[in-house]
Amino acid sequence: MLLVGFFGCCGALRASRCVLAAYFALLFALLLSELSLSVAALLARRHVSADLQQRLQRQLAQRYGLESQANGGFTQAVDVMQYKFHCCGIRADSDYLHTRWKNESASANSYRRNVPLTCCALAIADTTNSGSPISVVSRAFSGTVEEPWQTPNPVDERACQDNNDASGARHSRGCYLQLEAWFKTETTILIAVGISTAAFQVIGMVISLFLCQKLGDDV
């Protein structure tokens, strides 16, 4: 019905009606774009969530800690996720037992780390400015330094690295549930903003169409 009124309005020659018709067309194009983005975000959330835990565990086992400085997005995203959510690994802290990082790396204190320092209980654990895992990946490529999670300060590093008795010194729960909840919240906000904006644009389209028809009645 709106399109019928729009095309009827376009038939007028008066400049004011043509401006309103152009405004209507612009709002309609924006409406279609925003609804398309909202649907795409919903579909992307479902696609990303499918088998996400297994894919992250495979990536953790093969890539964590072994990326170059210029291509360390995954490692840095995992570190900030563990720092921000007070968790360790994807499913649990035991995920690191079977990683290439654990088998191939040794600390400066001549003992192998069983988990990254971001898994440890930290002396300073203020996460308010840590950012999100996705934003940290972006900052990693731009060279921005994020001191809190890049230089974690464990309360007791030795106890944190003790697989037999790390109680209180290491976070044992996995990060997947917190990451999934964060991702769903962010995409829900994105979809809600898109739909809300589209609703206001529909109102603008109706008003512009009403004014266009009103001008036609006055001719």
Image (cartoon, helix red, strand yellow):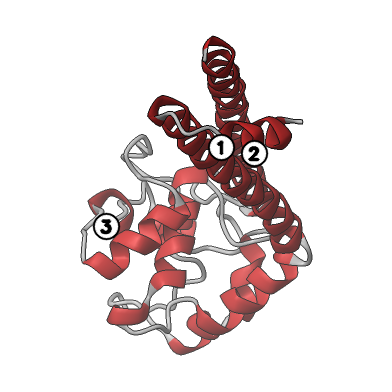
Q: Quadrant of residue 51?
A: bottom right
Which is more toward the observer, 148 or 206? 206
Q: Write down the residue under mark 3.
A: 151
- The spot of residue 121 in percent (x, y) is 44, 46
Q: Which mark is residue 7?
A: 2
Q: Are marks 2 and 3 in contact (CB under 8 Å)?
A: no
Please indicate, yes or no, whether residue 35 appears anywhere in the rendered image: yes
Mark 3 → mark 1, Cα distance in angstroms: 63 Å
Compared with 181, 19 (above or below) is above
At a point 51% along the width and 71% down the height, the residue shown is: 114
Say what amino acid the circle numbered 3 marks. Answer: Thr
Q: On the rendered structure, is 209 left or right of 105?
A: right
Q: On the rendered structure, is 36 left or right of 219?
A: right
Q: Are marks 3 and 1 in contact (CB under 8 Å)?
A: no
Please indicate, yes or no, whether residue 173 appears anywhere in the rendered image: no
At a point 68% along the width and 58% down the height, the residue shown is: 44
Q: Residues within 10 Å of mark 2 (few under 14, many from 20)?
A: few
- The spot of residue 106 in percent (x, y) is 38, 82
Q: Quadrant of residue 4?
A: top right
Q: Which mark is residue 10?
A: 1
Q: Nearer the viewer, mark 3 or mark 1?
A: 1
Mark 1 or mark 3, which is nearer the start of the sequence?
Answer: 1
Q: Are marks 2 and 1 in contact (CB under 8 Å)?
A: yes
At a point 65% along the width and 51% down the height, the residue shown is: 36
Q: Residues within 10 Å of mark 1 (few under 14, many from 20)?
A: some
Say what amino acid the circle numbered 1 marks. Answer: Cys
Q: Quadrant of residue 146?
A: bottom left
- The spot of residue 125 in percent (x, y) is 37, 39
- Which quarter of the rendering shows the N terminus? top right
Which is more toward the observer, 207 or 140? 207
